Image (cartoon, rainbow, N blue to C red):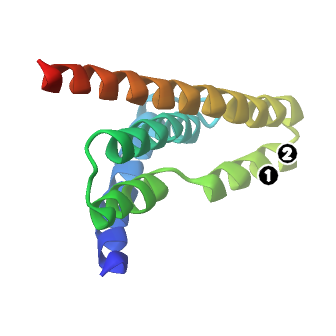
């Protein structure tokens, strides 16, 4: 049953990634792969935030959690596109852009994950405070 939940979440995550990516590609014309960068750093934030909340505060059903985290966010974010775009930049002689892309993706991804986790903690504490009153 968990595979079905993951598949449903993955279906919607992949579609959203395509929509976001297409939108950014249509309005931004840059060498830097901003659409994948945005998707991956937002996904880093979202995974930490939702994982923390669904484990700590809401005690969400395991299958629903899998659908959201592994399915939806896993399909929304994309390591394979990140590595392919990096290779394309390197093959086209854009070494500096590739290096900036890799370093920013890792650094900003970790920062966004940290912020998501901390914000999830704060949100859970706020919600717990409301329940006590």
Closer-to-camera residue (68/118): 118
Tell me the tag on residue 90: 2
Left or right: where does residue 86 sit relative to residue 13?
right
Q: Residues within 10 Å of mark 2 (few under 14, many from 20)?
A: some
Q: Name the residue located 78 percent from the left edge and 31 percent from the top edge.
A: 103
Secondary structure found at label 1: helix
Residue 41 rendering spot, x and y as whole percentages: 55, 35
Residue at 26% x, 53% y is 60
Tell me the tag on residue 87: 1
Q: In which quarter of the image is the N terminus?
A: bottom left
Residue 75 image offset from top left, x and y in percent: 45, 59
> Where is residue 114 drawn, in percent x and y?
57, 28
- Quadrant location of the C terminus in the rendered image: top left
Q: Which quadrant of the figure has residue 21?
A: top left
Q: In this view, does 111 lie above or below 65?
A: above
- Is residue 31 something one can see in this rendering? no
Residue 67 in percent (x, y) is at 33, 62
Question: Would you say 3 lies left or right of 103 here?
Answer: left
Disc sitting over residue 2 in the figure: none
SS assignment at label 2: helix
Residue at 72 percent across and 53 percent down: it is 83
Q: Which residue lies furthest to the left in this view?
A: 133
Asked if residue 68 lies left or right of residue 33, the reply is left
Q: Is residue 113 above or below residue 3?
A: above
97 to the left or right of 75: right
The answer to whether the residue labelled 1 contacts the one labelled 2, judged by CB atoms less than 8 Å apart, is yes
Q: Which residue lies furthest to the bottom in this view?
A: 1
Which residue occupies the foreground of this view, 118 or 57? 57
Quarter of the image for residue 63 reads: bottom left
User: Which of the 4 image quadrants contains residue 27?
Assistant: top left
Q: Which residue is drawn at 85% across and 45% down?
A: 90
Q: Distance between the residues labelled 1 and 2?
A: 5 Å
């Amino acid at each position: 049953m968990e595979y079905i939940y993951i598949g449903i979440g993955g279906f919607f995550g992949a579609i959203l990634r395509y929509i976001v990516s297409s939108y950014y590609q249509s309005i931004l014309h840059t060498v830097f792969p901003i659409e994948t960068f945005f998707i991956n750093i937002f996904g880093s934030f979202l995974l930490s935030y939702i994982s923390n909340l669904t484990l700590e505060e809401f005690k969400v059903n395991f299958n629903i959690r899998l659908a959201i985290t592994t399915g939806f966010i896993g399909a929304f974010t994309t390591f394979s596109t990140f590595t392919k775009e990096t290779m394309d930049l390197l093959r086209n002689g854009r070494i500096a852009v590739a290096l900036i892309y890799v370093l920013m993706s890792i650094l900003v991804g970790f920062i966004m994950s940290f912020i998501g986790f901390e914000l999830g903690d704060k949100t859970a504490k706020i919600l717990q405070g409301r329940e006590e009153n």
